[in-house]
Amino acid sequence: MHEDDLIIRPARPEDEGDLAVLNRAAWSPLSDVAPQPPEEDGVFDERHTPEQFLLALLDGRVVGYVRQVPATPLASNRHVRQIQGLAVDGTVRGRGVGRRLVEAACEAARAAGARKMTLRVLGWNTPARRLYEGCGFVVEGSLAEEFLIDGSYVDDIWMARRLVH
Ligand SMILES: CC(C)(COP(=O)(O)OP(=O)(O)OC[C@H]1O[C@@H](n2cnc3c(N)ncnc32)[C@H](O)[C@@H]1OP(=O)(O)O)[C@@H](O)C(=O)NCCC(=O)NCCS
């Protein structure tokens, strides 16, 4: 894939169908703590709005997304944003799409005045953990055995990256 072939842009309301298909296809116990969403489920609601999402498009096809939101509604916490959703279509993984999405989310947060980006990732999700490390995230803490998934207790890893130096 050539760098220029990939377009990253904010989501629009009409992207909901493509996002829902991608979200459902990317679901796996490696990355998700909630059950796979049913086919009829949408993506957008009062808490999940299009402007929170950045999409990756290859040849006009939605192949990935990242969602970033304020970490909390508190004014004292306004400088912190959190990635709450990242997925890349299985057919184009390993080609730099995930990295571009994470970088774009950090850039958008920095441009909006944020100083720090945080995220949570399951301990056994090695692809995502390597990706985040490669993008400059470090582990700030972990909740041991926080989730019981398919009969295994899995750690909840908290990672963060400074957006200003
Ligand atoms: C995690 C995910 C977004 C990565 O997307 P991707 O487009 O394949 O990632 P990239 O090609 O940009 O890879 C960037 C880096 O991530 C790491 N990485 C990606 N896939 C990996 C794998 N299977 N094993 C180990 N490291 C991997 C590598 O360090 C890679 O850098 P490199 O290419 O220089 O080696 C993708 O695997 C996915 O959608 N997984 C399911 C959903 C998910 O886990 N979301 C995160 C929830 S916290």
Image (cartoon, rainbow, N blue to C red):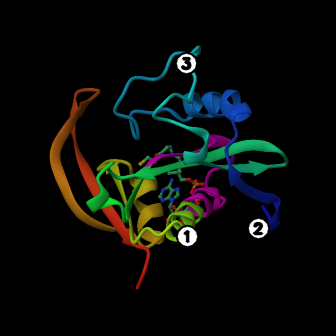
Sequence-wise first label, 2 or 3: 2
In the rendered view, does 134 fall on the left or right side of 4? left
Q: Dot 1 corresponds to which residue? A: 111
Which of 113/57 is in front? 113
- Cα–Cα span, label 2 and label 3: 33 Å
Q: Residue at x 14, y 48 (%)?
A: 144
Q: Which one is nearer the viewer's eye here, 143 or 67? A: 67
Indicate the quadrant where residue 126 lies. bottom left
Cα distance between the residues tagged 3 and 1: 32 Å
Give the residue pinned by disc 3: 41
Q: Locate residue 134, reporting x and y percent.
A: 47, 70
Q: Is residue 160 left or right of residue 93?
A: left
Residue 148 relative to residue 134: left or right? left
User: Does the magenta segment cover residue 96?
Assistant: yes
| x 78%, y 42%: residue | 61
Q: Sequence-wise, which precedes: disc 3 or disc 1? A: 3
Please report the residue visible at 18 percent of the width from the left and 40 percent of the height from the top: 146
Does the magenta segment cover residue 127?
no
**Earlier sequence position, callout 2 versus callout 1:** 2
Q: How many marks?
A: 3
- Within-10-Å neighbours for mark 3: few <14, some 14–19, many 20+: few
For this orientation, the residue located farthest to the front is: 75
**Of 1 and 160, the residue lying toward us:** 160
Q: Image quarter for residue 119?
A: bottom left
Image coordinates for residue 135, horizontal then vertical, percent: 48, 70
The magenta span reads: 84-102
The circle drawn on residue 3 is 2
